[in-house]
C-alpha cells in the first residue's frame, strides 16, 4: 500500500466497513436503516471477500450472525437503534451463549430523530443484556474500535455492542488505514451444547459466567486504552464519550477530560481517580443520563445535565450550557427546514389519493409512504414501528362502529411487509378477522436509498437470489382475496378498495408500481396545464405534487420535476391537464 | 488554537448539496488540512431541506459549526439559504445558486459545482486541488462536465459572495 493510500476521508459507516475488513470479519448481515445502511453497502462494494447480505429484518440478521459466529467466522451485524428492539430476543440470549468467532453488533442511534420514529438511547441495552459496549467518537475510532471489538469479543467470549450515532455514521473525518488481518481459518464443527443450547439447566450456568465476564471486563476497562485521561488545567473535569467528546474538546480545549471509548462496563477506579483529581466533575453525555446515574451509583459526586438536555443532539453550545449548569436550553429554535415530501411521480401519491376518495381510515407504517401523513394528503393516522400497520388496523376495527371499521385500511410497504408485516396478517387470518390491507409494492426499500429485499430477489452481494411473491405469501397463509393493481389506474383501484370495505374475510390489495427513483423519468413527456380550460379549482394542488405550483392565474407544472405520471391528468375535473403524445 | 474554517452548504434534496460538500471536504483533505464533514440524509432527501457542514484547519473537533461561526455559505436554494443566515459569522460570504445559473452552465445538474467554482476563491485552496477533488468525488463520466462547470464558476466576474 503506497503512502498516499494509507489515509482517506471516510464517513463513520465507511470506516466501520474498513474496520471489518481489517479485523478479518468474514460475514456481515443487516437490514437497511438510516443511519446504518452504508456500513453493509460499503462492505459489499469495497470488500467483496466478506460474505455480506441483507436480511429481511434485524432479528434474522442477528440470528444469521450468531450462527456464523458459532461456526467460527468473525461476524458483524448492523442495524439502526430501533432495529435492536426487533433483534432483542436473540441479543439477550447471545449474551449467555457468547461467541466462537467474534460477534460485533453495530447499533446506530439517531438523536434528534433525523430519520426515525423515536430517539431511544441504546446504551441501556448494554446494561440490560449485560454486554460490553464500545462508542467511537470519529471515523478513525470507528475503524479502530471494530478491531478492538473483535479482539474483546473473542477474548471475553461475548458479543460486543458497538454504538454509533447519526453524527458519527454520517460525518466524514480522516482515517489512517492499516493492513487487513486474515479471517479465522475454517474449523471442523465442534459441538458446544452447554454453551449454545440454552435450556434452563445450561443457561443457569452460563448466567454465572456472564456475571464473571462483566467483572473481568470491568477490570479490562481500567487498563484498556479505549478509556483515557487527557490532562488539562482548571478545577473542572469532564467525563464524556462518543460525539459529545468532540463538542467538549471544541468548547473547552484546556480542561482535563476522561474520554470513555468503552461505556459499559465502566472503569470505576479510573473514574474515581479522575474525579478526585479535579474540584468538580461534570458528565457530558447525549440523550439519557446513563453515565451520570452509573457513576453516582458508585458513590462518586458528579454533575449531570438539566432535563431539557436529554432531548435531541448536543452541539458545542449545548455542551457549554451543560458544563456551566444552565437549567434551561436557551439555544435558538432549530432552523425550520423545508419538510420532506413524496417525489413527483411517486406511486404512493396515487394510492393515497384513491384512499382519500374512499374516505379510508389508514393505519400506516415505516417508509417513504409515511410522508402521506403530511398536508395536503393527510391520509395516515398512525405510524409506530416496522410492521405495526396491519395489527393496528385489525385492532382499530375492534373498537370502532361498523361504518367506520369497514373503512380501516392497514397500509404497508413491500420491504416492511417482509420485515415484520406478515405476522400481523397471519394474526388476522388465524383469528377469522375481516379487514383490508394494502401493500404498496414499489419494488425496493426506498427510504433508505433503494436496497433489494426478499420481494425483489436482488441481493446485496449481487449473487443470484430468489424473488418471493407477496401474493404467494398472502394466498399461502389463507388470505381469501388477493389482487394486484397499478395504483396509477386510479378508477380500478378505487373500485377495488370500495369493494374490499364490505367483503368478509381479509382482503389484500397489492398496489404495485416501481419507485420513481428506480425509473428514468427524464425520458418521459411532462404534463401541461391548459390555462384556457383551467377553472382554478385547486384539485391538482390537493395531491401535493412538488412539480405543480400555484400561480396567480392557473397552476403551473415544472417540466424539470414532472415525471409524466399522469395522476394530475386523472385528478383534473375539467380535462385541463394533458400529456402530449409524441 | 489555530483557525478552523466552517463552510455550510444548503439546498433541497436532489440538488447535489451532499456531493458538493464531498468535493469541498475532499479538496480540504487533499490540501493537507484536518477535515470534518457532517451531513444529514435519509428522510430529508425526499425533497426536504438538506444541509451539510465542512470544517477544515490544523485540527478540527466538532463536525458541526458552533453558533455564528460559518464563514462561507453555499446555498443551492435561496429560501433554504435565508433560513440559515443566523448561523453566519460577521463578514461571512454567501453564494446563491442564482449566480451560478446566470453565469451559464446549461445543465442545471452541474450548478452545484459551478457555485463551488464561484466560492472557491474564498476558501484558499488551489484550482489544481479543486479539480483533483472533483475527479475523485464524481463518477468518471461526470468529471469533465463538472470540471468545466467549476472553471466557469471560477471565471465569474466578482468571485465574491454577498457580504452579510
Image (spheres, grey):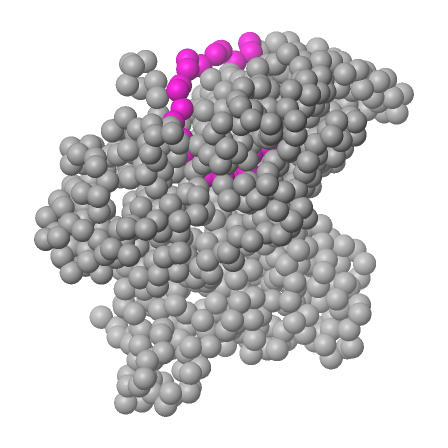
Q: Residue at x 63, y 74 (%)?
A: A360
Picture coordinates of residue A422, whole percent (x, y):
67, 51
Give the left or right position of residue B128, taking residue A77 as reference: left
Q: Residue at x 72, y 60 (%)?
A: A392
Q: Which quarter of the figure is the N terminus of chain B placed in?
A: top left
Q: Is residue A235 visible?
A: yes
Q: Where residue B108 sits in the image (x, y, percent)?
A: 22, 56
Q: Nearer the viewer, residue A494 or B2?
A: B2
Q: Is residue A85 left or right of residue A323?
A: right
Whether the magenta-drawn stretch holds residue A180 is answered as yes
> Which stretch did the figure color magenta?
A162-185
The image quarter containing residue A238 is top right
- Residue at point 19%, 46% (across, down): B117
Residue A83, image quadrant: top right
| B118 shown above or below A402 | above
Residue nearest the observer in this picture, A197 or B115: B115
Q: Is residue A187 left or right of residue B101?
A: right
State the image coordinates of residue B16 (x, y, percent, origin top left). 31, 50
Instruction: Give the quadrant of residue A6.
Output: top left
Which quarter of the image is occupied by the C terminus of chain B? bottom left
Asked whether residue A54 is drawn in magenta, I would say no
Q: Nearer the viewer, residue A132 or A570?
A: A132
Amino acid at each position: 500500500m503506497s503512502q498516499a493510500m494509507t489515509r482517506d476521508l471516510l464517513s463513520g459507516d465507511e470506516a466501520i466497513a474498513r474496520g471489518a475488513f481489517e479485523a478479518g470479519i468474514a460475514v456481515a448481515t443487516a437490514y437497511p436503516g438510516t443511519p446504518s445502511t452504508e456500513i453493509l453497502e460499503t462492505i459489499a462494494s469495497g470488500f467483496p471477500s466478506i460474505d455480506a447480505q441483507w436480511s429481511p429484518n434485524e432479528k434474522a440478521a442477528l440470528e444469521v450472525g450468531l450462527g456464523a459466529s458459532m461456526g467460527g467466522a468473525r461476524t458483524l451485524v448492523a442495524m439502526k437503534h430501533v432495529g435492536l428492539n426487533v433483534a432483542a430476543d436473540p441479543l439477550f440470549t447471545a449474551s449467555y451463549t457468547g461467541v466462537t468467532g467474534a460477534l460485533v453488533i453495530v447499533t446506530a442511534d439517531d438523536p434528534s430523530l433525523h430519520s426515525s420514529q423515536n430517539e431511544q438511547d441504546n446504551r441501556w441495552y448494554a446494561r440490560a443484556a449485560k454486554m460490553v459496549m464500545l462508542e467511537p467518537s470519529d471515523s478513525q475510532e470507528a475503524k479502530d474500535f471494530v478491531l478492538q471489538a473483535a479482539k474483546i469479543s473473542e477474548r471475553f467470549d461475548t458479543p460486543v455492542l458497538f454504538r454509533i450515532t447519526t453524527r458519527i455514521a454520517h460525518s466524514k473525518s480522516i482515517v489512517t488505514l492499516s493492513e487487513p488481518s486474515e479471517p479465522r481459518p475454517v474449523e471442523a464443527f465442534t459441538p458446544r451444547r452447554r454453551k449454545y443450547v440454552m435450556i434452563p439447566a445450561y443457561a443457569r450456568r452460563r448466567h454465572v459466567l456472564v456475571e464473571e465476564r462483566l467483572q473481568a471486563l470491568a477490570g479490562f476497562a481500567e487498563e484498556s486504552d479505549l478509556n483515557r485521561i487527557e490532562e488539562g488545567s482548571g478545577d473542572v473535569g469532564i467525563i464524556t464519550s462518543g460525539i459529545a467528546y468532540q463538542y467538549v474538546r471544541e468548547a473547552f480545549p484546556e480542561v482535563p477530560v476522561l474520554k470513555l471509548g468503552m461505556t459499559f462496563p465502566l472503569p470505576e477506579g479510573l473514574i474515581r481517580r479522575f474525579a478526585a483529581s479535579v474540584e468538580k466533575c461534570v458528565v457530558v453525555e447525549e440523550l439519557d443520563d446513563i453515565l451520570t446515574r452509573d457513576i453516582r451509583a458508585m458513590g462518586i459526586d458528579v454533575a449531570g445535565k438539566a432535563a431539557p438536555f436529554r432531548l435531541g443532539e448536543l452541539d458545542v453550545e449545548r455542551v457549554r450550557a451543560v458544563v456551566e449548569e444552565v437549567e434551561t436550553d436557551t439555544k435558538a429554535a432549530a432552523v425550520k427546514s423545508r419538510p420532506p415530501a413524496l417525489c413527483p411521480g411517486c406511486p404512493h401519491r396515487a394510492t393515497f389519493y384513491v384512499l382519500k376518495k374512499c374516505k379510508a381510515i389508514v393505519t400506516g407504517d415505516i417508509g417513504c409512504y409515511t410522508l402521506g401523513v403530511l398536508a395536503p394528503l393527510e391520509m395516515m393516522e398512525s405510524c409506530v414501528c416496522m410492521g405495526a400497520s396491519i395489527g393496528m388496523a385489525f385492532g382499530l376495527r375492534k373498537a370502532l362502529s361498523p361504518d367506520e371499521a369497514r373503512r380501516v385500511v392497514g397500509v404497508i410497504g413491500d420491504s416492511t411487509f417482509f420485515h415484520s408485516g406478515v405476522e400481523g396478517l397471519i394474526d388476522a387470518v388465524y383469528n377469522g378477522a375481516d379487514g383490508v390491507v394494502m401493500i404498496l409494492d414499489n419494488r425496493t426499500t426506498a427510504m433508505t436509498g433503494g436496497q433489494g429485499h426478499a420481494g425483489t430477489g436482488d441481493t446485496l452481494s449481487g449473487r443470484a437470489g430468489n424473488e418471493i411473491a407477496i401474493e404467494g405469501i398472502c394466498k399461502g397463509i389463507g388470505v381469501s382475496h388477493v389482487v394486484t393493481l397499478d395504483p396509477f389506474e386510479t378508477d380500478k383501484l378505487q373500485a377495488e378498495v370500495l369493494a374490499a370495505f364490505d367483503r368478509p374475510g381479509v382482503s389484500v390489495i397489492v398496489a404495485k408500481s416501481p419507485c420513481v427513483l428506480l425509473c428514468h423519468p427524464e425520458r418521459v413527456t411532462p404534463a401541461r396545464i391548459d390555462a384556457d380550460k383551467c377553472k382554478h379549482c385547486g384539485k391538482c394542488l390537493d395531491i401535493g405534487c412538488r412539480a405543480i405550483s400555484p400561480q396567480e392565474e392557473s397552476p403551473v407544472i415544472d417540466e424539470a420535476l414532472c415525471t409524466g405520471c399522469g395522476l394530475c391528468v386523472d385528478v383534473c375535473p375539467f380535462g385541463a391537464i394533458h400529456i402530449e403524445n409524441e | 488554537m489555530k483557525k478552523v474554517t466552517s463552510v455550510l452548504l444548503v439546498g433541497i434534496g436532489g440538488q447535489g448539496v451532499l456531493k458538493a460538500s464531498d468535493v469541498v471536504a475532499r479538496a480540504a483533505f487533499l490540501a493537507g488540512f484536518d477535515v470534518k464533514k457532517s451531513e444529514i440524509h435519509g428522510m430529508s432527501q425526499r425533497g426536504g431541506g438538506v444541509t451539510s457542514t465542512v470544517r477544515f484547519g490544523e485540527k478540527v473537533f466538532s463536525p458541526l459549526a458552533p453558533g455564528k461561526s460559518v464563514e462561507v455559505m453555499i446555498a443551492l436554494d435561496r429560501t433554504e439559504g435565508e433560513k440559515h443566515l443566523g448561523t453566519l459569522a460577521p463578514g461571512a460570504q454567501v453564494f446563491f445558486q442564482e449566480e451560478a445559473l446566470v453565469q451559464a452552465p446549461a445543465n442545471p445538474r452541474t450548478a452545484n459545482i459551478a457555485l463551488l467554482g464561484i466560492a472557491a476563491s474564498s476558501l484558499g485552496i488551489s484550482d489544481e486541488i479543486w479539480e483533483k477533488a472533483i475527479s475523485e468525488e464524481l463518477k468518471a463520466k461526470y468529471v469533465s462536465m463538472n470540471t468545466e462547470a467549476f472553471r466557469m464558476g471560477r471565471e465569474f466576474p466578482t468571485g465574491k459572495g454577498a457580504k452579510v
